[in-house]
Image (cartoon, rainbow, N blue to C red):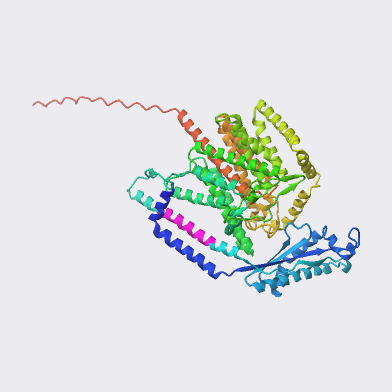
Amino acid sequence: MSLAEILATLRRRWYLMVPICVFSLLAGGYLYRTVPVSYSSESSISLLDSTGVAKLAPTFGNPIANAGGPLIVTADVLIRTLQSADAARSLQELGVTDTYKVGFAVDAPGPLLTLSVTGVGRTRVLDETATLTRFAGQQLRALQLQAGVPAAFQVTSTPVVLPQQPVSQLKTKIQDVAGTIIVGFAGGFLLCFVVDAVARARRWRGGVGERTRPAPARRRRGLLHRPLDATAVLTVYLYLALFIPSNLAVPALGGVGTPANVFALLGLLWFLASWLGGRITAPAGTRSARLAMCVLAAAVLLSYIADASRDSSHEEQLGADRGVIALLVWVGLVVLTTAGIQDRARLEVLMRRLVVIGAVVAAIGFYDFFSGSNIADSIQIPGLHTSVSGIEAMNRGDFVRPRSTTAQPLEFGGMLAILLPFAIQQALDPNRSGGRLRRWLPAALIGGALPLTVSRTSIIGVALVLLVMLPRWKPQRRWTAIGVLLGAVGAFKMIIPGLIGTLTNLFSSFLSNSDSSTQTRTVKYAEIVPYLEQRPLFGRGFGTFTPDLYFFTDNQWMLIAAEMGAMGVAALLVLGFTGIHQGGAIRRLARSDADRELGQAYLATAVVTLVISATFDALSFPMFAGIFFLTIGTGGSHLGFLRREEAAERAARRPTPEPEPAPAPARETAPAPVLEATR
């Protein structure tokens, strides 16, 4: 459906669209005028070791020099105490009735705590922050007195940052206003097409016209009259998702409001308008991916209800809203690929564009690595703000870890790992035009950029791709690939001295449990267990377990268990095994080597996603999540094409029943003579 046809439908149903839009604007204006501005103030305290312990070497009586080690555990106990229901009641008696938060300071190596209060009165918020700061020190003393700790060995607290002047939080207010207006406009848009579809169905039932797909309007020139298809819509999404840094987002929508996600929501509206208008019908054999998304949608909505049923903070409610928006984005990507692409040639075009754009992102990663900078830091787009604070060049060993246009090196490595199988498959495709350089350059860029991230996630991803794809190759190709891999390792060792050794040390320290990042994650696993026990079935709400309120999990499985419970874990497993099923089914139904390699690529991508999701919170990164769900949808679309081709071949091979001979006409018999009676 072209933009001109969409505008024509809206013009026909103006009596619905105009009042709803006006009402949405009035409701947004009412919220802006009536909802008070909230203010936030924060302070910081640090825990200091006791004077008795400080007399020992190497601090020699200086408590500040020993502000670490076991005090992290003490700080965690204090945080949990201040977050308890008893502490909340005590604070209410002291006058702290607004929302408060207590947690570790961001990027703090020691026991540094941040205390913040958010409310509607500037003076009141400042007083409540001061009260909360004093209460934290009192609770620390009370805990030690209750445990019978001698005074000489008691841990003390000291303010590091005094309560700051409250800062207005207009972002929350703007989010409420923007959400109201967007929901109203989207609802009016869809209602116009629903009413138009109902009116058309009534005309069909009344015998005014036949129930067939509407004939396309007479071709006119111009951008508005140019017909759109799902491949064109998804291509624009890929450009926005991979070329605009994923940490840049619309302020009113938070981290989920990247330009690519906003465009994906518009693409979903375009699909619904085309479907309601009878321009698009979902092809047969493509339901598996959409059914998996139904399972995920059920898990997200049930967790949203679970969040609404508990006493969650306003920040958690906003996080749950962002989770629903992310779900709509992912649903839009899967629906556009499985039901929107009607021609396999256009699907192949989309996959080639995906690999080429991914190769360009990998090339930017090469520049970041060798220049020691992040090119994404220099990209500033008016109207967009960074949704991830504190992004800077990350080092490991003597190397700068590139992130290209992603938000983090782990997202960069994970995204390239799920694109590598398709780059290899397209390079091996004999039907693809172009020379060897054109076919193998994307695979070389994507595969070569993975070790540069200096992360276990990338190496595990490459290993899984090889383990899945190598056994299915013929011996000659398999040994050639092993030789190329060994040559690449040697080239990296010569060109980038120390890189292979650094990667080897990452895994050796992991196996010996001497790696600091591994130990930190192990501690987080123990810390997240109480949250799992509180709500084991539906979780706390998808998108609510944010680092600002809790802590980083660095494990998507643990994060999904905390936010969506056992239902969420099951939904993520269904998604992964749906990808594995689609890859295996494509390989079984394939009639050519190219299709067999394609099925193996889908299977490898699904396996990689299931495994590396345990190494970082994968779905929290919009670029990785978007590419993953896009591959789930394209896998379902490829499988649908092969199923329809097989059904057509089976129908063509089926013998046509011979027509039965017509019965011989009945022989006419002469009437018997009638003898006249004689007298």
- Give the answer, above or below, for where 56 lies relative to 599: below
Q: Quadrant of residue 382?
A: bottom right
Total marks shown come to 0
Quarter of the figure with the C terminus: top left
- Can residue 339 be seen? no
- Give the answer, above or below, for where 526 lies relative to 484: below
- Give the answer, above or below, for where 343 lies relative to 153: above
Instruction: Describe residue 126's horizontal placement relative to residue 65 as left or right.
Output: left
Question: Can you give x and y, in whole percent of width and height, for residue 434 in the image?
Answer: 56, 30
Q: Quadrant of residue 153?
A: bottom right
- Name the residue rendered at 25%, 25% in the picture: 667
What residue range appears in magenta? 178-195
The front one of 551 and 389 is 389
Answer whether residue 188 is magenta in the image. Answer: yes
The front one of 287 and 132 is 132
- Can residue 443 be seen? yes
- Give the answer, above or below, for where 583 lies relative to 541: above
Question: Can you give x and y, in whole percent of width and height, for residue 676 in the image?
Answer: 12, 26
Dominant secondary structure (helix, strand or loop) of the stretch shown in magenta: helix
The front one of 467 and 648 is 467
- Name the residue rendered at 41%, 54% in the picture: 10
Q: Residue furthest left?
A: 679
Instruction: Describe residue 313's horizontal placement relative to residue 56 as left or right.
Output: left
Instruction: Describe residue 504's horizontal placement relative to residue 356 as left or right.
Output: right
Q: Quadrant of residue 49?
A: bottom right
Question: Can you give x and y, in whole percent of width and height, for residue 188 in the image?
Answer: 45, 58
- Name the residue rendered at 39%, 56% in the picture: 13
The front one of 435 and 510 is 435
Answer whether residue 620 is magenta in the image. Answer: no
